[in-house]
Image (tube, grey):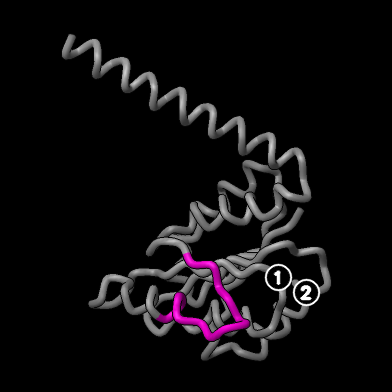
């Protein structure tokens, strides 16, 4: 069970770390790289080729501003690519979001919310759950815990206004 996470700049690391934490909690091997689509394209292509051949099951690509990284990754693999737009300019990440979500037909990138690396990790886990029963069970258990927490909060609100 393996997921790759690629960020375009080391400044993206604090936004990517929540995804690493979630995936490791589920026992997934995580390969993290900082490879710019514009400044390290040869290294990026070499890493994508490695992912295509080493059992990687999904790639999370986080980038801000022009945010070409997820699309460039998707153009070189048939693995699921999950794009994470990173806020970093005066446009609060909207530039990155629009760049990532506007992929041409045949080269899709699943896209999560701006700075949403945690949901990118959960989406990767859901993709992997079709193949790995242990992940599927853990996801269902976590969903049940979320529901219990929400229902407890509901009961507290009811009690407060009863």
What residue does disc 2 label? Answer: 52
Name of the residue lying farthest toward the left: 161
Q: Secondary structure at mark 2?
A: helix
Labels 1, 2: front one: 1
Span of residues in magenta: 99-111
Characterize the local packing of mark 1: few (<14), some (14-19) or many (20 or more) Cα atoms within 10 angstroms: some
What residue does disc 1 label? Answer: 79
Q: Is residue 110 magenta?
A: yes
Q: Nearer the viewer, residue 139 or 36?
A: 139
- Please give the name of the residue rendered at 57% of the width and 54% of the height, measured from the top-left corner: 123
Residues under numbered marks 1 and 2 in contact, where contact means CB atoms less than 8 Å apart? yes
Q: Secondary structure at mark 1?
A: loop
State the image coordinates of residue 131 (x, y, percent, origin top left). Answer: 78, 50
- Please give the name of the residue rendered at 24% of the width and 10% of the height, measured from the top-left corner: 159
Name of the residue lying farthest toward the front: 105
Residue 82, compared with residue 63, is above or below; it is above
The chief SS type of the magenta part is: loop
State the image coordinates of residue 141 (x, y, percent, origin top left). Answer: 61, 30
- Please give the name of the residue rendered at 54% of the width and 28% of the height, measured from the top-left corner: 144
């Amino acid at each position: 069970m393996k997921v790759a996470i690629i960020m375009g700049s080391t400044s993206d690391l604090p936004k990517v770390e929540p995804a690493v934490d979630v995936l490791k909690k589920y026992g997934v091997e995580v390969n993290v790289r900082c490879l710019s689509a514009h400044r390290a394209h040869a290294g990026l292509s070499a890493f994508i080729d490695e992912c295509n051949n080493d059992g990687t099951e999904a790639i999370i690509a986080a980038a801000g501003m022009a945010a070409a990284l997820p699309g460039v990754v998707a153009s070189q693999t048939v693995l699921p690519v999950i794009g994470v737009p990173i806020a970093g300019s005066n446009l609060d990440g909207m530039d990155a979001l629009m760049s990532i979500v506007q992929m041409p037909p045949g080269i899709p990138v699943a896209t999560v919310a701006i700075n949403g690396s945690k949901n990118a990790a959960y989406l990767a886990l859901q993709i992997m759950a079709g193949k790995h029963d242990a992940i599927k069970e853990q996801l269902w258990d976590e969903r049940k815990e979320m529901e219990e927490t929400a229902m407890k909060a509901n009961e507290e609100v009811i009690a407060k206004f009863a």
